[in-house]
Structures are given as structure tokens and as C-alpha cells.
Amino acid sequence: MNHELTTVSLEVCANSVTSALAAQDGGATRVELCENLYEGGTTPSYGEIFIARKLLHIKLYVLIRPRGGDFLYTDLEFGIMMADIRYCIEAGCDGIVIGMLNADGTIDKERCAEMVKLAKEWGLGVTFHRAFDMCADLYQAMEDIIELGCERILTSGGKSTAMEGSSTIAHLIEKAAGRIKIMPGSGVSEANVADLVHFTGATEVHSSARKRVESKMIYKNDHIVMGDTYGDEYSTDVTDTERVRNIIKMANT
């Protein structure tokens, strides 16, 4: 596939303002701000959103997801999501990232439409996230999301990683025929992004571009684990500016 006329852009999934700034410095065009990447990402705090908006000049999209797990939400959770969208509007964000499903694996069109309407009324863009990958029929789901008025779908092609789902991603891009952007994400790195772009024809890719950073703590209590998902309390994952640059470079080779 010939990409000479199209620059492939990178959206960075940033788990903090620190990561968002690294993404900006590396040349990312947009940040999807979230936290709790070990749960697949949840909505960041008001403080994170506020400071990110203050310091970023690239586009800032915020993940609207109140918890980990599935994408079948109660009315209470939906109320929380709508409140978070209102705060993103007040904070001056460029867009939101949403996804709600029905129990049968179809798009919850009714409630997603309310979120899209609220965002668009205030000029915010909307990305539909990888809840899409949990749908029973990806092609029908794409048509529903187009109908909702979303700008793009973040997808791994219904598989754990975008490389595994690359064949489906290529078909989705073909069937979308320019009506919506299909953005591959999950496991995208400098090692595979060139192949992914050439095979699928994607013009936007999504990566967290993270590296592990060791704590500067001198005293360390090695007899305690604070969370129940992973055991290292003295390191964190942060987006790496150099990795961002390399992914963009490789995506455009």
C-alpha cells in the first residue's frame, strides 16, 4: 500500500499528565488520557484532566469509563459517565472516548447517542473505544457507530492485539470507505507498526509507548503489596518520548 501522500499519525494512550507531555514532546497528534491501564483504562481524575488541558497544545481526548470489566453499564454508572463528559466540556477538552454495549453484544445505541449528542453540542469529537472488539458482529457494530456520528473506532480487530486482528482491521477500513476512521491499537510498537500500517492501510495508530521507570525511593518496604494485580510498588509505567518518535517514524517508512 502506498502511503507517500498520507502521513500516519499517532494517538498516545497516556496514563498520566507526565505521559501526555512525553507524547506531545515525541510528536503525537493526540492524547487519550486515562488511568489504570492494567484494567484497560478508566476515567482520569479531575486534576489530571485540568492540568493536562493547561499544559497540552495537542488534542486532548479523555476516556469515559467508570470501571474495568465489561461494557454493560447500570443507570448509576451511566449518570457518572454523563457527569464526566460535562466536566470534560468545562475543562476544554477536544474530545471523549466512549463505548457502551447491550447484554447481547450489540452497541447500546440509545445511551451512546446521548453521550455523542452532549459532546457534539459543545464541539467535542468522539472516539468509540475497544468495547467495539467485544461486539458479536463487528461489521454491524461499525455501521451503528457510524450512525451515531463518532469520528473513529479504536480497535484490535476483535483480537487481543492489533497485529493478530490485522486482517479484520484491513476489512473494516475497506468497508468503512472513508465514512469513519479505523484506528488500530493494542500491542502497537516500533517493531510492528510499519507492517501494521502497510497491511491495513490505517492512517492513525494508537499506542501507549511506555517504558518502566524505577522509583527514586531510598527506603523500600519489601514485605508489602499494595494492590492485587501486580506486585512491584517501586516502579511505574510512563510514556517514553523516544518510543513515541520511533513509532511515528516507523509508521511512516
Image: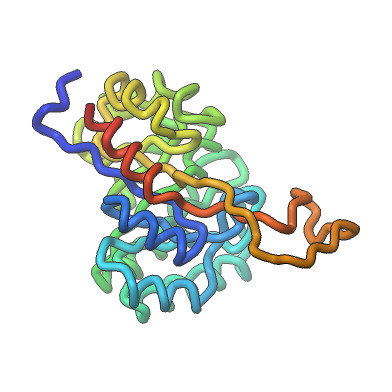
Left or right: residue 163 compared with residue 181: right
Image position, residue 44 (x, y; %): 53, 67
Q: Is residue 113 visible?
A: no
> Measured along the vertical axis of the image, is residue 29 above or below residue 158?
below
Q: Residue furthest bottom?
A: 90
Query: Which residue is pictured at 33% across the width and 73% down the height?
Result: 55
Q: Is residue 196 visible?
A: yes
Q: How is the image coloured?
A: rainbow
Q: Where is the C terminus found, in terms of image quarters? A: top left
> Measured along the vertical axis of the image, is residue 134 above or below residue 214?
above
Image position, residue 76 (x, y; %): 63, 70
Nearer to the camera, 80 or 155: 155
> Measured along the vertical axis of the image, is residue 67 above or below residue 182?
below
> Measured along the vertical axis of the image, is residue 47 above or below residue 2?
below
Nearer to the camera, 143 or 206: 206
Query: Which residue is pictured at 61% across the width and 55% down the height?
Result: 236
Q: Residue furthest left?
A: 5
Left or right: residue 210 compared with residue 142: right
Image position, residue 220 (x, y; %): 80, 63
Q: Quadrant of residue 171?
A: top left
Query: Which residue is pictured at 49% across the width and 43% down the height?
Result: 130
Q: Where is the N terminus found, in terms of image quarters? A: top left
Image position, residue 108 (x, y; %): 49, 51
